[in-house]
Amino acid sequence: MTMDPTILAIIIFGTIVTFLPRSAPLMMLSQMKIPSKVIEWLEHIPIAVMTALVVQEVLIPTYEFTYIIGNLRLLAALPTLLVALFTRSLLFTVIVAMLSMAILRLLF
């Protein structure tokens, strides 16, 4: 099997283009002293991003099956939220979310 030079160049340059934006900030920030207030602020970013993603998926209507029961994603989010709050387990939360959506799509 021979490797086409064009394909090899695409793989190499694709690796570089993917690696640089991820590693450059890490290398630069590891040499800097970051103030504690900035670190406290940065700790809130993951929950803010997750909230934005969940709200977009659950609350904005997609018009799938809305003529029968309403927003299926919102209905599937209710048991998922309960499991997330009570178990604090990502695995169980994801399983309940998938099962809830599968059952709702099967029924409606």
Image (tube, rainbow, N blue to C red):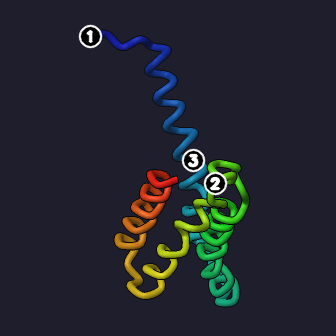
Three-letter amino acid code at disc 1?
A: Met
The quadrant of the rendering that contains the N terminus is: top left
Number of dots carrying numbers: 3
Say whether marks 1 and 3 touch (CB < 8 Å): no
Whether residue 80 is situated above or below residue 99 in the rendered picture = below
Q: Quadrant of residue 35?
A: bottom right
The residues bearing labels 3 and 2 have C-alpha atoms spaced at a distance of 48 Å
Q: Is residue 103 left or right of residue 16?
A: left
In primary-sequence order, the first of circles 3 and 2 is: 3
Rendered location of residue 85, percent (x, y): 48, 85
In primary-sequence order, the first of circles 2 and 1 is: 1
Residue extending farthest right: 60
- In this figure, which residue is indicated by the disc labeled 1? 1
The residues bearing labels 1 and 3 have C-alpha atoms spaced at a distance of 30 Å
Three-letter amino acid code at disc 2?
A: Ile
Rendered location of residue 37, percent (x, y): 69, 89
The residues bearing labels 2 and 1 have C-alpha atoms spaced at a distance of 55 Å
Q: Secondary structure at mark 1?
A: loop
Q: Secondary structure at mark 2?
A: loop
- In this figure, which residue is indicated by the disc labeled 2? 68
Q: Quadrant of residue 66?
A: bottom right
- Density class for disc 1 (Cα within 10 Å; few <14, some 14-19, many ≥20) is few
